[in-house]
Image (tube, grey):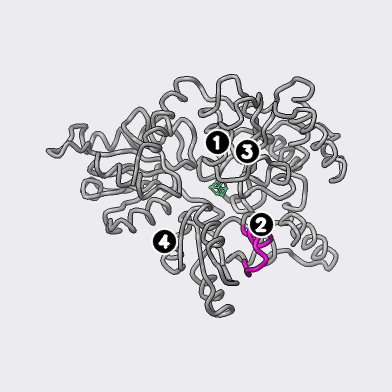
């Protein structure tokens, strides 16, 4: 099976030859270009943007990091040259460098990864390589921050393209969360109830900035992943009367609903509105306050796609990620993290048809790794995560060859105080048990 990128290149070329639009096949013809064209467009426009793909319509905050220009030689190098240069640099570096590849990263980059996994698995995988001076994280910005928090101070975490952020993580800025917190404290006060539960516990999804993880650490809160969100919410309900959950409303809603929290007790907090767009009584009656954030990759999945899969493939097993909207999770046969999806496929002993609701690079890889099954993405349009897409083998070759020359480029560092507080929230997560 060809990679997502090869499929995009083919479709774009064929449709251009026929003078047709790629709409319906891929979500943007710009996906076929080198991401450096987007780096250039951004610097000319003077404003950051997420690039082509699922998040292209989301607003990037002005503070979103931008990538300077990739040296010309890496833009001009063909696939074979980049492959040879990456392999040669990797060989020279040996155990001095470890390459991490996220599940949603393109195959052309993942093929060089020493470890492939979700963000937390990868940060932990890096811990098994204390000899590595450099951790090259082929994922997005918040993942590199988490790796920096968990790794040794002398280890440098490198993000091959600084513009590889995460639109969902950017939807909860530190200032807007602090403002929300102040407004909530005015309404709820800070005193615990008779059962010793504080008015509100902040819970941040792993897909958030280090600053927000630190905010949770400072304020009695905790981090969660899509694998342990239920356990973490239970931990929070033992200690708090309610939860402020950010940035992903869908993971928060799907998890709280599964725990029996009624929808009317889950108001949404829109940071652009006073009291998040709520009245005081609604907030007082709440159990989970959901931040107005979402993942534009998972927002693309809908119930009509599930109905079509069921009509086309009777008996199909539909599994979606909990970042999908609630009605999609409700209509699926199962919902869970990337690890859950992988395990569900591995557990099928008979040839099975799976329709999967998560990022296309991961779905295609699962299909290639499990030829005994029929596995396809619920979304018929190839629309990868825009920010993962910003990493291309050209950037990987650049950061590796710079390391060979003794230069560290694109280092991601988290301030010591932020690290210390973020670690508190991460350690609470690790200690939380079902
Ligand atoms: S898939 Fe969604 S949550 Fe994950 S990095 Fe991309 S935009 Fe962020």
Kindly identify the residue that appears in the image at 20 percent across and 34 percent down. 189
Secondary structure, mark 1, is helix
Dot placed on the residue nearer the N-terminal end, 4 or 1: 1
Q: Residues within 10 Å of mark 3 (few under 14, many from 20)?
A: many
Dot placed on the residue nearer the N-terminal end, 4 or 2: 4
Query: Between marks 4 and 2, how big is the CA–CA gap?
Result: 26 Å
Q: Is residue 325 magenta?
A: no
Q: Is residue 44 left or right of residue 353?
A: right
Secondary structure, mark 2, is helix
Picture quadrant where residue 134 is located: top right
Is residue 272 visible to us here? no
Query: Between marks 4 and 1, how big is the CA–CA gap?
Result: 29 Å
Q: Position of residue 107 (x, y in %)?
A: 71, 50
**Residue holding disc 2:** 365
Q: Is residue 365 magenta?
A: yes
Kindly identify the residue that appears in the image at 39 percent across and 29 percent down. 424
Q: Position of residue 12 (x, y in %)?
A: 78, 60
**Residue holding disc 4:** 326
The front one of 13 and 114 is 114
Please state the extent of the stretch shown in magenta in the rendering.
Answer: 363-375
> Which mark, by number, is residue 123?
1
Q: Residues within 10 Å of mark 1 (few under 14, many from 20)?
A: many
Dot placed on the residue nearer the N-terminal end, 1 or 2: 1
Q: From the viewer's perspective, is the residue at label 2 or at label 3 nearer? A: 2
Kindly identify the residue that appears in the image at 78 percent across and 57 percent down. 9
Query: Between marks 3 and 4, how big is the CA–CA gap?
Result: 31 Å
Disc 3 and disc 4 in contact, CB within 8 angstroms = no
Query: Between marks 1 and 2, how big is the CA–CA gap?
Result: 21 Å
**Residue holding disc 3:** 48
């Amino acid at each position: 099976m060809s990679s997502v990128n090869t499929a995009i290149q083919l479709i774009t070329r064929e449709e251009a030859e026929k003078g047709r639009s790629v709409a319906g096949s891929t979500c943007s013809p710009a996906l076929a270009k080198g991401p450096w064209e987007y780096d250039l467009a951004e610097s000319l426009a003077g404003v950051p943007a997420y690039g082509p793909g699922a998040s292209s319509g989301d607003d990037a905050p002005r503070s979103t990091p931008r990538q300077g220009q990739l040296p010309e030689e890496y833009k001009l190098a063909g696939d074979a040259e980049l492959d040879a240069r990456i392999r040669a640099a990797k060989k020279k570096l040996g155990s001095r460098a470890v390459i991490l590849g996220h599940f949603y990263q393109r195959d052309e980059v993942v093929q060089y990864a020493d470890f492939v996994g979700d963000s937390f698995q990868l940060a932990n995988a890096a811990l098994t390589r204390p000899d590595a001076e450099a951790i090259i994280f082929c994922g997005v910005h918040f993942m590199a921050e988490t790796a920096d928090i968990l790794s040794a101070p002398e280890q440098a975490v490198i993000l091959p393209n600084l513009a590889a952020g995460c639109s969902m993580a950017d939807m909860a800025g530190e200032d807007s969360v602090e403002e929300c917190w102040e407004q909530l404290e005015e309404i709820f006060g800070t005193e615990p109830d008779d059962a010793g539960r504080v008015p509100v516990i902040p819970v941040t999804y792993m897909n958030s900035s280090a600053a927000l993880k630190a905010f949770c650490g400072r304020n009695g809160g905790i981090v969660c992943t899509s694998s342990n969100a239920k356990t973490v919410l239970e931990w929070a309900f033992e200690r708090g009367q309610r939860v402020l959950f950010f940035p992903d409303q869908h993971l928060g809603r799907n998890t709280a609903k599964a725990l029996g929290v009624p929808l009317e007790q889950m108001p949404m907090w829109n940071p652009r509105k006073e009291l998040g767009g709520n009245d005081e009584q609604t907030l007082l009656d709440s159990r989970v306050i959901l931040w107005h954030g979402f993942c534009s990759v998972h927002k693309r999945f809908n119930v009509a796609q599930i109905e079509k899969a069921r009509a086309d493939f009777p008996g199909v097993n539909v599994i979606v990620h909990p970042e999908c909207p609630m009605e999609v999770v409700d209509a699926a046969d199962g919902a869970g993290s990337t690890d859950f999806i992988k395990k569900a496929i591995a557990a099928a002993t008979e040839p099975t048809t799976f329709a999967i609701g998560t990022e296309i690079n991961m779905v295609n890889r699962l299909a290639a790794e499990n030829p005994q099954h029929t596995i396809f993405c619920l979304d018929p349009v190839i629309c990868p995560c825009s920010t993962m897409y910003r990493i291309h083998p050209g950037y990987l070759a650049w950061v590796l060859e710079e390391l060979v020359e003794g230069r560290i480029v694109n280092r991601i560092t988290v301030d010591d105080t932020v690290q210390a507080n973020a670690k508190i929230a991460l350690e609470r997560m690790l200690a939380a048990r079902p």
